[in-house]
Image: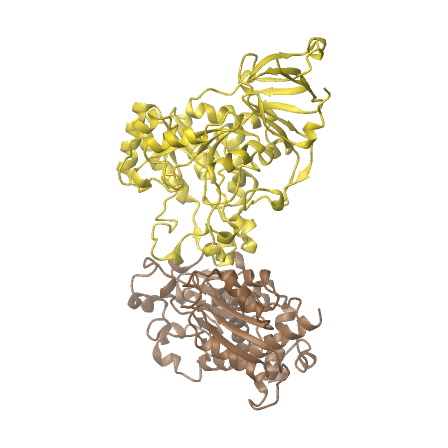
Amino acid sequence: MTHIIFKSIKLINPATNFNQKVNVVIQNETIISISKDLNLEKFNKDNQTIIYDCEGLTMSPGIFDMRVNIGKTENLKFTQITAAESGITSMAILPNQTPKLNNPSIIDHIKRQSEDINLPKVMVYGAATKDLKGLEISEIGLMSEMGAIGFTNGNKSIKNSLVMRRLMSYATMIHRPIIQHAEDEDLSGLNQASTTSIRGEMNEGEISTRLGLIGIPACAEVIIIERDIRLAKLTGAHYHVAHVSTRDAVNVIREAKKSGLNITCDTAPPYFSLNESKLLTYNTAFKLSPPLRSEDDRLAIIEGIQDGTIDAIASDHRARSKDTKAQPFSAASVGASGIETLFSVTLDLVHKKIIDINKAISFLTINPAKIFGIDTPSLEEEKVANFIVFDENEPHIIKKENLKTSPTPFDRKKIHSKILATFINGQAAFINQIFKNKIIK
Amino acid sequence: MNKLFKNNSEVNKFSPVKLSSHHFLAIEDMQKSEIQKLLDRADYFANLDKHADTKYLSGYVVLNVFFENSTRTRVSFELAARRLGAEVINISLINSSIKKGESLLDTASTLNAMKPDLLIVRHPHSGAPLLFAEYLSCSIINAGDGRHEHPTQALLDALTIKRRIGYLEGLKISICGDISNSRVARSNIHLLTTMGAEVRCIAPSTLMPSSLEKLGVKCFNNMKEGIKDADVVMLLRLQNERMSGTENPSEREYFNFFGLDETKLSLANPNAVIMHPGPMNRGVEIASALADDTNRSLIKTQVEMGVAVRMSIIEALNHSKNKT
């Protein structure tokens, strides 16, 4: 019988509000013991037991990254492996890939294709509308039966109010959320596909004026959210706003939550760590959707994280090839990599004393799980061993040349925590050399 | 004319200018002293007979790479380079490799492999020349990038004003028209405010970019207010190719409120001069008769000064590269 023992590790388990130094023992795929005192003798006799000295290290549930784009530069397996190395034990992928995730059989196919006991679990969003065109609702009931956890048009807004109303209404029958990329695409110029020269390129303001880039006003986000909140009230649907980026959006969602509506939202690390001033050199790694906003918006996102208006933090991973980014800003592709920096940039909020570590871990683990009503990950005896081991005090610098996905908006950012190991179903999906050296038996 | 100049012009004008960069990308990056020196040197060139021997750059290879249509800027750069003795090759890439799917950087690095000394780039995308400068080893001049900057135009405008009025500091300069889509406006705003002029921008609210006042200008939607006591009225072309059709109801309505005519001009300083970077839409931005009024319109002088200004810049880039 193989036991793996994590000796003297700080265990953070938000589901039980637990934060103590303990010894954790796993056997096969299960946590068999969490205790302060550990009788090592009985394990010492067993040759197959591995003991890690985890003094100074921390264990928490693995990350559930609820927003991942699988782009053309990646395949699912590659993204799963990279995710495992980044502390992610489950992730939800968007329907806007090739082929589009818009029917039950493809949802089933993706789930089977991605099934691997030692890789992050892949969950799937179904296309909310047929062919992601925003005109007719797709087979969300059947896709739901195949395991789709929610429905969205991915990186496009569901624009038509009647379509949105029907979607929300229908989704109440299957108890699934509708996830919206909130952007009034007429206002941001993205709907006028024929004349590329007037497409919104960045946040509107002094910097867009200086750079001569076309601005997307901040209100393009809240306009859609305000409409959708009214439709959520009309239909009783669970409405989820993806990657919230503006103060107005946070304010409106806060009020809607107070009024008792079933509304949730997430944001992504760029929106609480960066602002539009990053674009001053036309660096296309910062060309994102929604665009990086003003400093005031960034501060509002932090306030939303602090007071719980924002429920979860997702990577919003959208890796792009170097070729599509080595372009003039207007011609460059939109999006940046995110899975590899999600954990450390989120924990930067702890280092900056914006939130405590328990809360930071919650944003990455149990909070997204609660949004979808799926089993909340919890590290307790008899539960499955899906967890990460990390060092909260390992200062280092993110370097784009060391990442597997590109581009990163966090190149040269100083961070303070590092993932050392990811265990999925009791097996090491990833262990780095530092952690290997912690083996004492 | 030179006696009207301030700031060591006597020293500057007889020798090439040395700049802090071997690229010329944006006025926003430039110091007042550099602008001043380039203007002094350009003034010197403007005073020379066009057959004077200024062939200081023999063997210097200039590629004029235009990704957007241009007549006056391209010819002006070519003349400037030729008057300096450089070899010039004009390349129009509007319908060429780009359409074949080659990426901009591939095109650029192919050109760079031919070892030119200078690439003069016009591109429809803001920031494109910056990308060239980042990846290529030769000097780059921005000949207009999207809505961002047209730095040589701002210098030639400044030289035109200085030669007519004598100075820039304290002048009231009204820039009127499609500010939102205009790289000329942005470069002029940066240059003129740096040199101490009072800049007012006049545009319909749909063509006034966000937070423009943070660039140090006063903004007006009413031309009659914006033009009051102006010493210089600078008009901009309506950039229909960069508009979506929702900015402006009609050219007729635009001319009524924002076109320069005798009535509106009468509110400016009685000696006010009129400028336009061209090409002009007569009867839209400016009444045709005013454009042709040689006492007030400096439009042809602007074109003339373009060559002198571009000579001073090309020479300066060569000089700045040699010395670093």
Q: Residue at x 55, y 26 (%)?
A: A62
Above or below, B193 relative to A246: below
Quadrant where the N terminus of chain A lies?
Answer: top right
Q: Report whether residue B39 is seen.
A: no
Q: Position of residue A185 (x, y in %)?
A: 36, 46
Quadrant where the C terminus of chain A lies?
Answer: top right
Task: Give the chain letter for brown.
Answer: B
Q: Position of residue A420 (x, y in %)?
A: 64, 30
Closer-to-camera residue (A367/B109)? B109
Q: Residue at x 62, y 78 (%)?
A: B40
Q: Where on the picture, by quarter, is residue B22? A: bottom right
Q: Where on the picture, by quarter, is residue B285? A: bottom left
What colour scheme was applied to this rendering of the protein?
Answer: by chain
Above or below, A128 relative to B277: above
Q: Residue at x 56, y 55 (%)?
A: A281
Closer-to-camera residue (B224/A81)? A81
Q: Where on the picture, by quarter, is residue B162? A: bottom right
Number of callouts: 0
Q: Report whether residue B202 is seen.
A: yes
Closer-to-camera residue (A228/B4)? A228
Q: Position of residue B267 (x, y in %)?
A: 42, 72
Q: Position of residue B323 (x, y in %)?
A: 71, 72
Closer-to-camera residue (A23/B6)? A23
Which color has been applied to chain A in this rendered view? yellow
